[in-house]
Image (cartoon, helix red, strand yellow):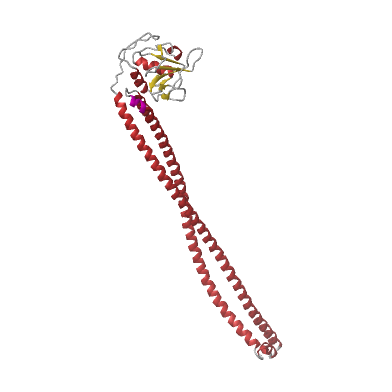
Amino acid sequence: MVKLHKKLVSVFVAFGLTVSCTSNALAAPLQEQYNSSLQQYQNALKGVQEIEDKISAIDNEIEKINTDISNTNNKIAVSKNKISQEQQKLTEAQEQMEDQQKVYEQRIKAMYMSDANMQYFDVVLNSKSFSELINNVENVKNLIQYDNNIMSNIDKQKQNIDKQKKLLEVDNSALEKLQNQNKSKLADLNAKKAEQDKLMASEKAEEDKHKTEMAQIQSAMDAEKKKLQALTVPTSSGSDTTNPKVPTSVSGLAVVKLASQYIGVKYVYGGESPSGFDCSGLVQYVYGKLGISLPRTSEEQVGAGSPVTGDLQPGDLLFFEPSPGGPGHVGIYAGDNTFIEAPHTGANVRVSPMRQPCAVRRIIK
C-alpha cells in the first residue's frame, strides 16, 4: 500500500506541473478523489475482514450446536430404546400381577362363600392328634401369610412400575427439552449468519466500487504522467551557494519532477540521501542533482536566490517556522498550491497542501 500511495502522490505532483491550466485545475481534485476512494476502499476491506471474522465465529458455533444435536439425538434414541425395553418388562410384570390377583381373588372368594370360611377351622378341628393339630395350625397360618404376601407383592410391583415410568418420562423429557433448545440456538445462529452474509455482500460491492474508481482515477493520472516524461533532468556544477549558478536548461518543473521521485522516503534527522532526508537535506540533494549548489541548512538556504513577493513558481523554496536563527523548515513548491517536504520524524517525504510561509526564495529565474 505504501508503494501504491507513493506512486499515486508522485503522479499527482507531475500532473500538477503540466503547462495546461485545465490540467492544473484537475490535479488536486484527482488527488482528492483517489485518496477518498482509497480510504473508502480500505474501510470496505476492513469491514469485509470484520464480517468474515464474525461469520467464522458463527460457523464454529453452528458446528458445535450441530454436534450437540447429533449427540442428543443419539441419547434420545438410546433413551427411547430403554423405555421400550422397560415398557415390555412392565407389560410382562403387569400380566403376572393380574394372574396373581386372580388367584388371590379366587382364594378370598372361596374363603368367604357360604360356609367356606369354615374350611380353615375344619382343618384344625379335624386333626387326629396334637402334633397334627400343631402342624395344621402352622399350615393354615402359612397359607394366610402367603395370601398376604401375594397382596403385598402386588402393591410393591405397582409402586415400582409407577416409579420406573416416571423416571423414564423425566429423563426423556429432559433430553427432548435440551434438543429443542439446541434447535432454537441453531435457528438463531443461522439467522445471524444470513444477516452477516447480507452485510458481506454489501461490503464486497462497496469494495469493488471503490476499486474500480481508483483504477479509473489512476488511469487518468498515468495519462498525465506521460506528458512529463519528456522533461529532461540536466546536470552541471556550481559553487556559489548564495547566488548559485543555474544551468539554462534547468527549470522549476525539472526540480519538482526530481523531488517527486523521493516521495515516500523516510524522514531522518540530518539525512541528505535517498536512504533518508530531513527537510533541508532533501532540498540540497535535489538541487545538487541538477547541478545547483545550495547551503545545507534551512537557516542558510533562506539566504540563497532571490526573495519572491508575487506569484509562486514550481521549484521556489518555501520557508516555515521562523526563529531568531532563521526558519526551521523548508519545502519545494510543486504548483497548484502544494509543496514537497520531508516533514518530521516518523513521517515520509510527501506532498502537502500549501500553508503560509514566512519566506519564499527563487533559485531558478
- Where's the N terminus, which quadrant? top left
Which of 206 and 119 lies nearest the eye of the viewer? 206
| Residue 15 showing in the rendered view | no
Which of 318 and 345 lies nearest the eye of the viewer? 318
Q: Which residues are magenta?
A: 21-26
Q: Is residue 12 above or below residue 190?
A: above
In the rendered structure, does residue 24 fall within the stretch colored magenta? yes
- Residue in view at x 41 percent, y 33 percent: 36
Residue 155 percent coordinates (x, y): 62, 74
- Where's the C terminus, which quadrant? top left
Q: Quadrant of residue 205?
A: top left
Q: Residue furthest left?
A: 230
Q: Is residue 165 above or below residue 296?
A: below
Residue 298 percent coordinates (x, y): 44, 15
- Residue in view at x 47 percent, y 46 percent: 57
| Residue 166 showing in the rendered view | yes
Q: Main secondary structure of the magenta part?
A: helix
Residue 162 percent coordinates (x, y): 59, 70
In the rendered structure, does residue 108 fall within the stretch colored magenta? no
Q: Quadrant of residue 6?
A: top left
